[in-house]
Image (cartoon, rainbow, N blue to C red):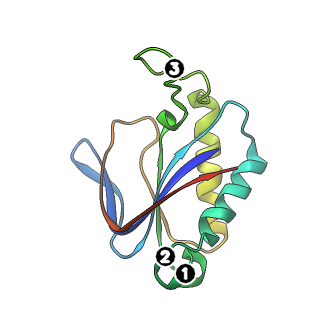
Amino acid sequence: MRAVAARVTRADVTVGGEVVGAIDEPGLLVLLGIHVGDDPAKAVTMARKLHELRVLRDEESCATANAPLLVVSQFTLYGDTKKGRRPSWTQAARPEVAEPLVDAVVAELRGRGATVATGRFGAMMAVSSVNDGPFTVLVEV
């Protein structure tokens, strides 16, 4: 499981002209990719890492600052570009495996008390954000 976590002052995701998820205060925009070998245990670990990641101002985390997260599924994080000009997607989990694991990460975050907005799995999404810093890290479990 792989995530790109960006510290933002605000972020939203739009599908078909409709905002489906947004955070309007400082927090994390999380682009989340699921690997073919991922399982529910990794979802729990990823949620904990994201929630406790000390990358907000003053080395706070979403847990300590009560900051929101916007989680957007992104299978392209497992695109392999080592050969040729066209990425290979063989390491990205198929939708029927990935969607429940993305949902599990979101549910685990909410179970930890986090405020979580989401995109719409499988949809063509327009993601907008105002990066803070910018400060962006790669999180893998």
The residue pinned by badge 1 equals 59
Q: Residues within 10 Å of mark 2 (few under 14, many from 20)?
A: many
Name the quarter where the N terminus is drawn. Answer: top right
Looking at this view, name the residue that lies furthest to the left.
17
- Residue 81 position, x and y percent, is 49, 25
| Above-or-below relation of 11 to 98 | below
Marks 1 and 2: CB-CB under 8 Å?
A: yes
| Above-or-below relation of 24 to 72 | below
Looking at this view, name the residue that lies furthest to the top.
84
Q: Residues within 10 Å of mark 1 (few under 14, many from 20)?
A: few
Question: Disc 3 or 1, which lies upstream in sequence?
Answer: 1
Report the residue at 55% width, 75% height from top.
62
Residue type at mark 1: give it.
Glu
**Measured Cα–Cα span from mark 3 to mark 1:** 37 Å
Label 2, secondary structure: give it.
loop
- Residue 94 position, x and y percent, is 59, 26
**Measured Cα–Cα span from mark 1 to mark 2:** 5 Å
> Which quarter of the picture shows residue 135?
bottom left
> Which quarter of the picture shows residue 108?
bottom right
Label 3, secondary structure: give it.
loop
- Residue 100 position, x and y percent, is 63, 41
Label 1, secondary structure: give it.
helix
The residue pinned by badge 2 equals 56
Report the residue at 49% width, 76% height from top.
56
Of the numbered discs in the image, which one, if any, rests on residue 131? Answer: none
- Residue 43 position, x and y percent, is 69, 51
Marks 3 and 1: CB-CB under 8 Å?
A: no
Q: Is residue 35 left or right of residue 58?
A: right
The residue pinned by badge 3 equals 88
Q: Is residue 78 left or right of residue 17?
A: right
Report the residue at 21% width, 46% height from top.
17
